[in-house]
Image: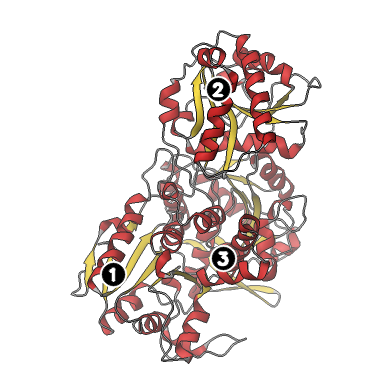
Amino acid sequence: MRAWFACTGAELLARDAADIVGRLASAQQARGFSGSTDQQAAWEDQVAVLRTALAAHDSAGWTIALEYDLLRLERRIDAVLLTDRAILCLEFKLNDRSPSALREAEDYALDLRDFHAGSRAHPIVPMLVAGNAPSAEPAPSLLLDAVWPAMVCARGELAARIAWVQSRAAPKPLDGPAWLDAPYRPVPQIVEAATMLYARHGVAEIAQAGADRPSLTRTSDAIMRHINAVRAAGERVVIFVTGVPGAGKTLCGLNTVFGVARNDGAAFLTGNAPLVAVLRTALARDAQARSRLPRAEAERRVKTALQNVHRFLEDGALADDRVPDTSVIVFDEAQRAWDAAKAVLGTRNKPSRLTMSEPAHALQIMARRPGWCAIVALIGEGQEINTGEAGLSEWARVVAAQGWRAVAAPRALPVAPWLAHDAALDLTVPVRSLRSEATAAWVDAVLNDRVTEAAAITPPPFFITRSLDAMRAALRRFARGERRAGLLRSSGAKRLRAEGLAAEVAADDVPDWFLLRWPDVRASDALESAATEYACQGLELDVAGLAWGGDFIRGPGGWHARRFIGTAWQRDAKEAHFVRNTYRVLLTRARAETIIWVPPGDAADATRPPAQMDAIADYLRRCGVRDIPAAAPMPEPALLL
């Protein structure tokens, strides 16, 4: 049970208050937390307030759960009250009635809605109980879903607020014991997951994604099983983990590095520089706060676990006798590893030291380890966004050439003497989207001109607008609680500048964009700058605003890719595959809603003809994208059940 203490309303009123507080203190100690007199006094006050409120109602059959753990947030709800009509999330504060305190209470309610199986069919009411000054009675408000807007009440008003909720919610009895035992399986954002895994050496519950969806447990267990097998046999293996966008490949990789393989000095390698920067910054800050480590030491430890794959390979190629420090590496976005031509060429800013493809170097470097070793290669489908990306075929070639073994899902690679098949290594169900499991399938249909198929899919959480101001307003409305919103755009959408969206997130600013919060103007939810596919791939937003550019438009036969050169657009059929995948990445970044802004264009500007933008908007609507809901009064909560 996730609650530190739970009972019925009758038990709460009959049991000695000191006994309840003592049980909470024992649970706190059993979980390794230190107690304090302030905490004990807070519990005494909460129990007294709850007893007074429940005594005013026929509450004997209700259920109260105190200190309910929320893994994703690494926090606890002070109290969850299950009446015969609603779930009340109660956050107690001394006197704090600030907007941030209200957002905290609302975020707890949203977490229950999204990840607790027993909460899905009931209205959830976040309530901030703070101070003794009277508060205004709540008024009917806009409701987007089963989570009501957060409300404030004084300690002495709790009974009246409960009565207000009861009068507006339809009777819908809650089974208290069943609710307490219902699965709670959070799917944290990548940053949240990395922080928890790094601090706690693996969190098994993270692998069980979604309160009632197929979980990641099967794939995580399969990775562990194959690593243990090669460890026992003294062999070398590449474990290919494939999956659709948002299916949890990075979660599996992080769980491997920080969990089952941590004692082997495992490292997470990625060529995604923004992902490295964001995760390193987040983990170092958290390590400082938890362990009071000096900043330099916290950053050093994090760098060992999270490395840039290009630097890892170049360092290994330069010192050809260097033995890696780790027996396990997780190669993120392995389908994007450079082929030989790109690897040897390097970049404009840095000449290369490589002589082969990156997959070939990875196997050669890891083979220097005496005994066993494993490479976990995470393969994303349809996410190649650059030329020179080798793909799965190059991995297959070098595995065979260098005498390694490999294991993959049957659909990933054909039968070969060096290959074993394991269907558990294929992640086919997206878990990023909290609203629809069909998001990845819908995006694929939209981007490949299968309009009938897209329209037949249950409406996904995508909305459209032609107004930049309307998009920003809707993002703020949808980003409830502590949920994060942000703007996205293609790097090739050069003429968005003329539409009023000029700023791109610079590489050095990506950690601040993903980690800071409004009102800091550097934060994503300031909605002032937009992240491109390079800045956001591998990372997530709760609510995304996608600005559609002129680099991917409708024309005869479907979609057409273009590149802006000088003062005009040039057709770029050669890059069509990569531009299509750019929009695939951008359309699959949100965990909840995505709002697509298709600019209106300008008839006086030959680079922004309105007809082209109109054609995109019309096509998206035919695929099932809905207009942003009007800001009109919603039905009373009881009618939403």
Q: Residue at x 40, y 80 (%)?
A: 362
Mark on residue 275?
3
In which image quadrant can residue 19 be found?
Answer: top right
Distance of mark 1 from mark 3, alpha carbons? 30 Å
* Vertical arrangement, residue 341 with respect to residue 117, above or below: below
Which of the image's four quarters has the N terminus? Answer: top left
Q: Residue at x 20, y 73 (%)?
A: 416
Element at label 3:
helix
Residue density around tag 2, few if under 14, some if 14–19, many if 20 or more, within 10 Å? few
Q: Mark 2 or mark 1, which has the lower sequence index?
A: 2
| Residue 636 relative to residue 259: left or right | right
Q: Residue at x 43, y 46 (%)?
A: 205
Give x and y (percent) for residue 576. Answer: 49, 69
Q: Residue at x 68, y 59 (%)?
A: 513
* Vertical arrangement, residue 46 with respect to residue 268, above or below: above
Give x and y (percent) for residue 236. Answer: 29, 75
Disc 2 marks which residue?
19
* Vertical arrangement, residue 244 with respect to residue 395, above or below: above
From this viewpoint, is residue 571 visible?
yes
Give x and y (percent) for residue 141. Answer: 69, 25
Furthest toward the right, the residue is 133
Disc 1 marks which residue?
231
Q: Mark 2 or mark 3, which has the lower sequence index?
A: 2
Furthest toward the left, the residue is 417
Residue density around tag 1, few if under 14, some if 14–19, many if 20 or more, within 10 Å? some
